[in-house]
Amino acid sequence: FNAKFVDTLIFGKDPSEWEAVYSAVGLPLPSIAGETTVSGEATLPYYNAGFVVVPSNVDFGRVLLEMCLAIDADPQVKNKRPWLDQIALPLVVQKLNLEVGLLGETHNFPLHLRPIDESDRPVFCHYHSPRQLLKSRSTVSALRRIALEHPYIWDLMEQQSDWRQVAKLDRAPLRQRISHAPGLWYMLQLRDWLGEMYHKGRTRKAELERNAIVTGFPRSGTSLYSTLLNSIPNVVCLNEISFTDNTFSFYRRIRARVTAGLPVTNKYSGSGSLTTNTIGGGTQRDGRVIPVEDDQFVLAQKWTLPYLNRLEELCDEGWNVCVLVRHPLYAISSWKRCPPHFGISKIDPPDGPLTHIQFQTSDPDERRVEIWNHYARAIHSLRDRLNIVRYEELVLDPGLELQSFCDSYRLEKPKLTLELKTRNRTDSYRSNEELSELVNGRCEMNLFGDEAEN
C-alpha cells in the first residue's frame, strides 16, 4: 500500500475521534504514528486519498467499502464527512495487514497549499479547485498541451462555472496557429538542443570529471550499485530520475540544487532507505535534501537502457561510465519476472528503447537472448573506455568494487559492514531447461568471462 500522509490534520485532532473509528470496526488502535506533510502535526496513520496505490491481488475495494459503511453507520464517529474514505484507509491497511510505503509530494503535491518548485516538478498534483491550476507555470503548460491535442476541452470548461476562469487561457487564434504549425515540434527540439549545447559548453573538464554515469543490463545490480555509491562520503547517485538526452543540462541543474541544499528526488524503499531492488513493491520517489561535504562531490545517475543506447556518445563526450553486467541466464530469467511496466518485459512488440534492435525471431526467449547479445557486444566494443562491474564480483566483495570507484575520484572508501547475498541461485528463478539450453548455446557470455550454467 502506497500513499502520502494528509497535508494538515482536520480529522483526529481529538484522540477520541480515532478511538471511536477503530471501535466502530472492532480493530485495536495502532501503535505507530506519523506526521502531516505540510503542517507537521503528529497523528495516527492518516493518508490522503488523492493518490493511492494498492496491490491488485487483494480485495481492497470490498474491505474499503465495508469500513466506510461501518464508520458512517456509527453515531459515535463525528466529523467524518467529507473525509470518510481517508479515515477508512488506515483501517483497510490494518485489516489486510498490508506493508506501507509512504509516498512523497512527487506523487501527490498539494497545489492548493503551496506553489510548485518549477525546478523540481511533481508527477501528480492535488489541486482541489480548478482556479488552483492557474497558480503554477507547470500546470498552465500542462493544460495548454492537453488542449493542443483536444481543443474541445475549452468548450467543456466554458460550460462549467468552476472552470470558466481556467477557460480564459484559451486564445483561439494563437492556439489555431500553434496547433497547425508543422514546425512546432522541431522548434521545441531546437530549444532543448540549444540549451544542452549551452550547458555542455559551460561544463568545465574539472566538473565533468566529478560526474559519473551508471548503466548496465536491466536486473544486473544497477540499483544495488547506486545505493552502495551513495554510502561513499561526498557521492550522490540518483536512481532513474531523468532519462532526458540533455545530460549536461540535467547534471548541472541537480548539482546546483544539491550545492544549494535544496531537495532532490531519488527512489526509496517503503522503509525510507534508498532502494536496492526496483522490482519489489514499495519503491517510491521522494524529494530530500542530500548533505554533501563540499561542492566537489561526485554526482551520478543510473539508467539502464536509455544510457546503454547512448554508450558510445557518452564516452565521446567525456563522461565516466560504469556498466553493470550479469550472467545472462540469471539476467534473462529476471527479465521474465519483471512487471508489465518495465521496458525489458515488453518484447512483442518491443518497448521504445528496444525498437532499434533487428530481431530475427518472434519467440520471446530468443528475443531476450538477442537483446542480451546486442548490448553485450556494444559494451565489449567499448570495454577500454568503460568501468565494467560484474554483478557476481560486486556481491562477492562490494568493498573491492567500491575501492575501484573511489580510486577513480580520489575518495575515501566507506567502511562496509553489510554482507551481500547473490541472487544467482537456481531456486530464485524458474528457468526451464529450454531457456538454459538457449542461453548456454547462443549468449556470447565469454565476453565477460561467464561460463555455461544449468
Image: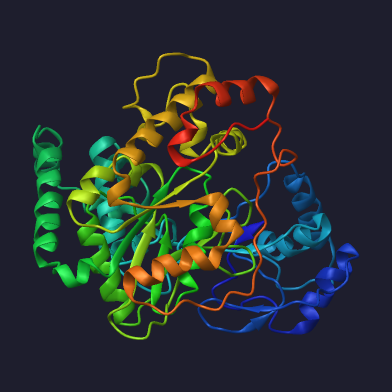
* Nearer to me, 170 or 339: 339
| Residue 227 position in % (x across, y down) | 51, 65
- Residue 40 sits in quarter: bottom right
- Which quadrant is the C terminus positioned in? top right
| Residue 313 position in % (x across, y down) | 21, 45
| Residue 122 position in % (x across, y down) | 40, 61
Answer with left or right where residue 322 lies relative to residue 85.
left
Q: Establish if 12 lies above or below 137.
A: below
- Which quadrant is the N terminus positioned in? bottom right
* Nearer to me, 301 or 243: 301
Can see residue 111?
no
Q: Establish if 96 lies above or below 34.
A: above
Answer with left or right where residue 239 lies relative to residue 271.
left
Q: Establish if 75 lies above or below 453.
A: below
| Residue 297 position in % (x across, y down) | 32, 77
Can see residue 139?
yes
Answer with left or right where residue 314 lies relative to residue 430.
left
